[in-house]
Image (cartoon, rainbow, N blue to C red):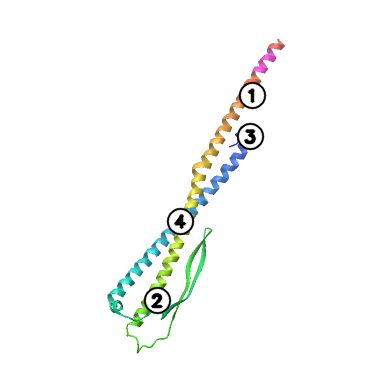
Amino acid sequence: MAKLALNKTTLNREGGRLKAFRQFVPALDLKRKQLLAARQETQQLLQANQLKLQDLHLCVSEKLPMLAGAEIELSQLLQVQKVEVKYSNLVGLELPELAEFKVELSEYSRLVLPHWVDTVLLLQEQTLKLEVEIRIYQQRLQILEAGLQKTTQRLNLFDKVLIPQTEKNIRKIRIALSDAERAGVVRAKIAKSKRRRLQL
């Protein structure tokens, strides 16, 4: 680090830097609070969807025990047709969210397959949608965590390093300028008294 010049120009420059740093802190703190709120909301949505998924699995095992012994191939009847993810901007972060989810149901004979296949396909569609939403919320959470960490680091840099260092520099310059001014006054008095003595 370059040596600090103890003059008025440096004092003005450090004062300007301090003012700028102090303006950044509230904006960064607000950003951090918004990210914290978004993270909390995303965690709640993720947990809610995970619970719904668990409930669906439980519902299938309770209401459709016949699936365990069934030799019917149902995976071909339901295909994911469209998953569209849109992105929304939150304080500079692009956050994903599910915009559209479509499945395609193949034609099948209700006379050939058991009556409970309709229920299975409906539950399977709900399960697929929940799994997609969970993946999106997990991705969103990772983005928010990274953004929050970066914002917190910046806030700490300004709040705990740059501002205190600049304040310390300003104090140091002011003391040096004050000492120099005092020394100038003392030199002027000494010179004045010498001139008086010479005149006598």
Q: Earlier in the sequence, mark 3 or mark 1?
A: 3
Amino acid tagged 4: Glu
Pointer 1: residues within 10 angstroms few (<14), some, or many (20+)?
few
Identity of the residue drawn at 50% across and 44% down: 159
Magenta segment:
190-196
Would residue 182 be found to the left or right of residue 158 on screen?
Answer: right
Q: Considering the numbered disc 1 on the image, is that residue within a helix, a strand or a loop?
A: helix
Residue 172, image x, y percentages: 56, 32
Tell me how far mark 3 sits from mark 1, CA to CA.
16 Å
Q: Considering the numbered disc 3 on the image, is that residue within a helix, a strand or a loop?
A: helix
Q: Which residue is mark 3?
A: 8
Residue 109, image x, y percentages: 38, 88
Mostly what secondary structure, the magenta segment?
helix
Near-viewer residue (15 or 120): 120
Q: Where's the N terminus, which quadrant?
A: top right
Q: Which residue is mark 4?
A: 145
Q: Where's the C terminus, which quadrant?
A: top right
Tell me how far mark 3 sits from mark 4, CA to CA.
43 Å
Would residue 174 be found to the left or right of residue 39 on screen?
Answer: right
Q: Which mark lies nearer to you, 2 or 4?
A: 2
Pointer 3: residues within 10 angstroms few (<14), some, or many (20+)?
few
